[in-house]
Image (cartoon, rainbow, N blue to C red):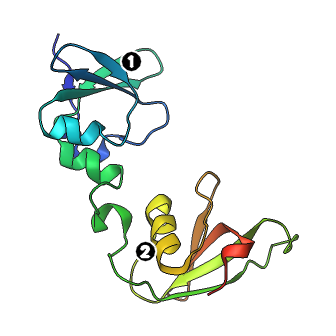
Amino acid sequence: MEPRSAGALGADFPYTQRTLCYIEVAKDGAVSHGTDAGTYERARTGESRLFAVWPGEWASHLFVIDDLDQYARAHGLIHDKERTGLAEHEHSVRWEIGPSETKPSSIYVSIEVELDCECTIEDLRTFASQMRVQRGWDIATSGGWGRSTRQGRTTYSLRARRKSLTS
C-alpha cells in the first residue's frame, strides 16, 4: 500500500499539528522520527524521504511529504504571506496593556495589538518571530490568543513578556 500524498491536500494538510508524527527515511535505510533543523534540507536534496502519520479517531494514515515547499511554508522555513497574513516588512504596530489584565506586574501580561500596515495575524509563531526581531518583544505562542473586529479595526489579544514591551 502506497502512502497518501500530503501535497495533494495542499495547505489543508496539518503540517504543524502536535499529534502528527514525522518519520524520516535516509537513503541508507536509517529511520528516525521527529524533525530537526536539517530535516527539510535532507529531504530537499534527496538524502532522505519524509513521511507523516496523521492519527485519526479510528485509524492513523501514512502520508508522504511530497510537496516540500508546503512543508517549509507551514514550518516557517519559507515565508508565506498567504498562510501567515504577514508581509516581510517592518510592521506598523499600536499596542496597549489589555483592559482585562488583572496583574500588570506579572511576567507575562495581556496586550491588545492593532496593525496599521494592512497585515493580519494568521500564524502567531510567525508574528512572534517578526516582533522579536523588529521590537525585541517576547510573545507567548503556547497559549490562546484571539482577534476581534469593531468598526473596521481588528484588534489581537496576545500575551507578552512584560519586560520586552519597550516600544
- Which element is circle 2 on? loop
Q: Which mark, by number, is residue 120?
A: 2
Q: Position of residue 77 (x, y in %)?
A: 31, 54
| Position of residue 82 measured from the top left corner of the image (x, y, whole percent) | 29, 65
Q: Residues within 10 Å of mark 1 (few under 14, many from 20)?
A: few
* Picture coordinates of residue 150, whole percent (x, y): 58, 83
- Please determine whether, in this image, residue 141 is positioned above or below residue 36: below
Residue depicted at x 42% and y 30%: 20
Q: Looking at the image, which is closer to me, 153 or 102? A: 102
Camera-nearest residue between 32 and 116: 32
- Residue displayed at 19% across by 43% down: 68
What residue is rendered at 43% in x and 84% in y? 91
Q: Are marks 2 and 1 in contact (CB under 8 Å)?
A: no
Query: Mark 1 highlights which residue?
Result: 60
User: For the residue marked with disc 2, what is the amino acid?
Assistant: Thr
Q: Is residue 88 above or below residue 166?
A: above
Furthest residue in direction left, as rendered? 46
| First in sequence: mark 2 vs mark 1 | 1
Against 45, is 11 above or below?
below
